[in-house]
């Protein structure tokens, strides 16, 4: 099939215009295949996997009573169409969400640019809303800087310290091993020391909280007012800037690092967390003119349009909204 026809089929599903039978087959298909493709595969491998899934789905949808025959034929037709679309679809999915080389990673077509300034031996990188930045340090460490964030680090490391300063926002760190040179990230009153470790630090000012989440290795988290804590993988330490309490909990990796893939994953999120997540992802400004700001919102969005995200959240929170060029206004329902 031609690619424009394939796109239209997938777009019909995304717009909610498929039949219930087609939608059920598509969702089952996505759930069965979607998470398998974490590295590029050849066209032959893709086709082989798609054939396996086709056989499995067809087996599940064996025609039963006569009154369901028509629905079954619709579903079977949908499977055939989707398998034909598979090679194109997964070629698109296999494109890396963020490049492996240092550079700017625009989100949702944002035209803004990050800034990089070198002064007094330090490099300062600022990202606007809607832009992520990948940074490669001279020691081999890697940083992914989220949107609306600011980081500062030495142009050249000297002595036994590798000090990084996350002055605002969020960043993911892959610290290169260095037994004699500790890798330290400073974010407000929270200091994280690591050796050969991957971890995420979130320190947006409006959230009144700094969170360090460990993905691999081991880190020590210290604050000005609390005893230090040692984190193991899948543990995070959250420091409340109002109560000055440091709390250790467990986390799901997607909830912490999903922003690198363009995901929005909220779990009992406050209004500020939801606002910051959407603004960073889509490069917009959200203005809340409603009387509702005490949120505990839970929801997952993966590669959704801004309109779909706002529509879903407003339905949950019983709000109305308008979307302009770069502004979203939330209002009470009349």
Image: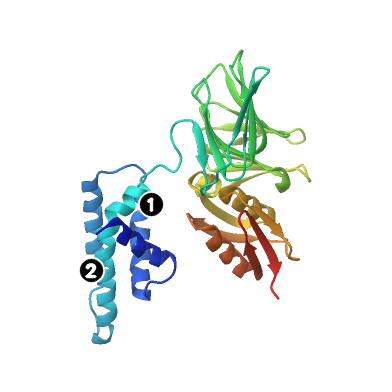
Please give the label number shown on residue 35.
1
The CA distance from mark 1 to mark 2 is: 22 Å
Residue lying at 41% horizontally and 72% vertically, measured from the top left: 17
Callout 2 environment at 10 Å: few (<14), some (14 to 19), or many (20+)?
A: few
Image: 239 above or below 12: above
The quadrant the C terminus occupies is: bottom right
Kindly state the secondary structure of the residue where label 1 is placed. Answer: helix
Residue 135 is left or right of residue 118, and the answer is: left
Residue 245 coordinates in the image, percent (x, y): 74, 43
Kindly state the secondary structure of the residue where label 2 is placed. Answer: helix
Residue lying at 21% horizontally and 47% vertically, measured from the top left: 44
Residue 159 coordinates in the image, percent (x, y): 61, 13
Quickly name the residue at label 2: 59
Residue 150 is left or right of residue 215, and the answer is: right
Residue 308 coordinates in the image, percent (x, y): 53, 63
Task: Please state which of residues 306 and 203 is positioned toward the viewer in this rendering.
Answer: 306
Q: Is residue 164 visible?
A: no
Task: Please state which of residues 29 and 212 is positioned toward the viewer in this rendering.
Answer: 29
Residue lying at 55% horizontally and 43% vertically, measured from the top left: 111
Residue found at the far bottom of this picture: 67
Residue found at the far top of this picture: 159
Image: 188 above or below 31: above
């Amino acid at each position: 099939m031609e690619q424009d026809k394939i796109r239209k089929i997938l777009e019909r599903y995304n717009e909610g215009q498929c039949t219930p039978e087609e939608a059920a087959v598509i969702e089952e298909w996505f759930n069965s295949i979607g998470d398998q493709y974490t590295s590029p595969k050849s066209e032959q491998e893709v086709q082989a996997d798609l054939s396996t899934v086709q056989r499995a789905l067809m087996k599940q949808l064996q025609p039963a009573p006569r009154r369901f025959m028509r629905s079954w034929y619709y579903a079977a037709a949908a499977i055939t169409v989707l398998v034909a679309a598979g090679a194109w679809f997964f070629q698109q999915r296999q494109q890396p969400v963020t490049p492996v080389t240092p550079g700017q990673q625009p989100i949702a077509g944002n035209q803004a640019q990050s800034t990089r300034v070198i002064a007094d031996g330090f490099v300062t990188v600022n990202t606007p809303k809607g832009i992520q930045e990948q940074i490669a340090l001279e020691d081999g460490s890697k940083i992914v800087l989220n949107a609306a964030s600011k980081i500062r680090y030495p142009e050249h490391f000297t002595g036994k310290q590798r000090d990084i300063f996350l002055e605002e926002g969020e960043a993911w760190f892959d610290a290169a091993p260095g037994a004699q040179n500790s890798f330290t990230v400073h974010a407000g009153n929270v200091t994280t020391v690591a050796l050969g470790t991957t971890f995420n630090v979130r320190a947006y000012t409006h959230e009144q909280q700094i969170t360090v989440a460990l993905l691999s290795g081991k880190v020590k988290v210290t604050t000005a007012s609390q005893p230090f804590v040692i984190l193991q993988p899948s543990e995070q330490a959250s420091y409340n800037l109002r109560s000055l309490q440091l709390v250790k909990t467990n986390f799901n990796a997607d909830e912490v690092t999903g922003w690198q893939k363009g995901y929005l994953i909220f779990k009992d999120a406050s209004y500020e967390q939801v606002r910051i997540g959407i603004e960073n992802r889509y490069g917009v400004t959200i203005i809340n003119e409603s009387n509702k700001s005490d949120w505990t919102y839970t929801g997952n969005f993966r590669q959704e349009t801004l309109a779909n995200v706002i529509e879903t959240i407003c339905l949950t929170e019983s709000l109305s909204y308008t979307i302009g060029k770069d502004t979203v206004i939330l209002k009470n329902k009349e």
